[in-house]
Image (cartoon, rainbow, N blue to C red):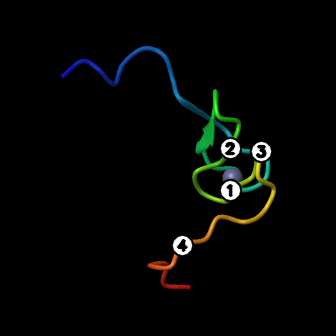
Amino acid sequence: MGRKSGKKTHIYCRRCGQRTMHKRFKSCASCGFGNSARMRSYSWQKK
Ligand SMILES: [Zn+2]
């Protein structure tokens, strides 16, 4: 299980400040900032 070490996939997002900005996709997993500038939202989301 040493797969998670090494290259990082997510870098710090400058919008939400969390380390959820994808390096290759250029999109934040938390706020959705990146290629699609709209906010991330799902149907199963509480808020
Ligand atoms: Zn973000």
> CA gap, disc 3 to disc 1?
8 Å
* Sequence-first disc among 2 and 1: 2
Q: Where residue 12 sits: x, y (%)? A: 67, 39
Instruction: Residue at 51% x, 24% y: name it.
Output: 8
Disc nearest the viewer among 3 and 1: 3
Element type where label 1 sits in the image: loop
**Rounded to the nearest whole Å, what is the CA distance between mark 1 and mark 4?**
11 Å
> Which kind of residue does numbered mark 3 sit on?
Asn
The numbered mark, 4 or 3, whose residue comes first in the sequence reads: 3
Residue 27, label in figure: 2
| Residue at x 53%, y 28% (from the top left corner) | 9
The Cα–Cα distance between marks 2 and 1, rounded to whole angstroms, is: 6 Å
Q: Which mark is residue 32?
A: 1
Q: Residue at x 44, y 79 (%)?
A: 44
Q: Is residue 36 above or below residue 6?
A: below
Task: Pick the quarter of the image with the C terminus.
Answer: bottom right
Disc 3 marks which residue? 35
Q: Is mark 1 within 8 Å of ligand 1?
A: yes
Q: Which of the two residues, 11 or 41, is positioned nearer the viewer here?
A: 41
Tell me, for residue 42, which label it has, or none: 4
